[in-house]
């Protein structure tokens, strides 16, 4: 594997793991006021496309990273949708 | 280009565009209370790794998508860091 290809691993781990503290904070505090609903609508849909891409090409790392991110972003989206306006 | 490869375009456009409404809302309202600082620290670093990967393999779509996302996520991170605790 080329050296450049190795960059994908910290990149995917960081951009996936990033949503753990956000989902946890949103769940714990139920403070969604600063969270953009359009962001999570677009982002969740985009990650679903990345997951579909991973499934289509049969790439386990793409499937796992985007599957986890989809779950975490969906939690934030669901909390935002159910938060008082 | 295989049909599956085409999925990358809506995926990349959606996950990049998602940060426009978040950066705009955070900038306009300065309400960062629901935003997780660890999320934006990890995410910004991860997107920087994706940008480095794009530069290393010379892929313009990867460079453009992650360059834009890095700028937008950095705005949210900077606003969060400078927000009153």
Image (tube, coloured by chain):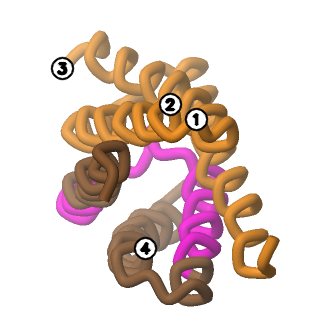
Chain colours: A brown, B orange
In the image, farthest residue toward the front: A2
Q: Position of residue B64 (x, y in %)?
A: 65, 33
Residue A85 x %, y % = 55, 54
Determine which residue is flagged by label 2: B55
Circle 3 or circle 1, nearest the eye: 1
Mark number displayed over residue B85: 3
Q: Residue at x 61, y 88 (%)?
A: A56
Helix, strand or loop under label 4: helix
Question: For the residues carrying marks 2 and 3, which lies nearer the camera in this image?
Answer: 2
Label 2's element? helix
Q: What stretch is highlighted in magenta?
A: A22-51
Q: In which quarter of the image is the C terminus of chain B?
A: top left
The residue that disc 4 covers is A62
Mark 4 or 2, closer to the camera = 2
Measure the C-alpha gap from mark 4 to mark 1: 20 Å
Circle 3: element type: loop
Residue labelled with disc 1: B58
């Amino acid at each position: 594997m080329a050296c450049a290809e190795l960059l994908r691993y910290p990149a995917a781990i960081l951009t996936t793991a990033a949503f753990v503290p956000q989902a946890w904070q949103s769940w714990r505090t139920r403070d969604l006021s600063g969270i953009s609903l359009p962001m999570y609508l677009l982002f969740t849909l985009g990650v679903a496309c990345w997951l579909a891409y991973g499934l289509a090409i049969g790439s386990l790392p793409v499937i796992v990273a985007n599957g986890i991110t989809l779950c975490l972003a969906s939690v934030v989206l669901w909390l935002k949708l159910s938060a008082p306006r």
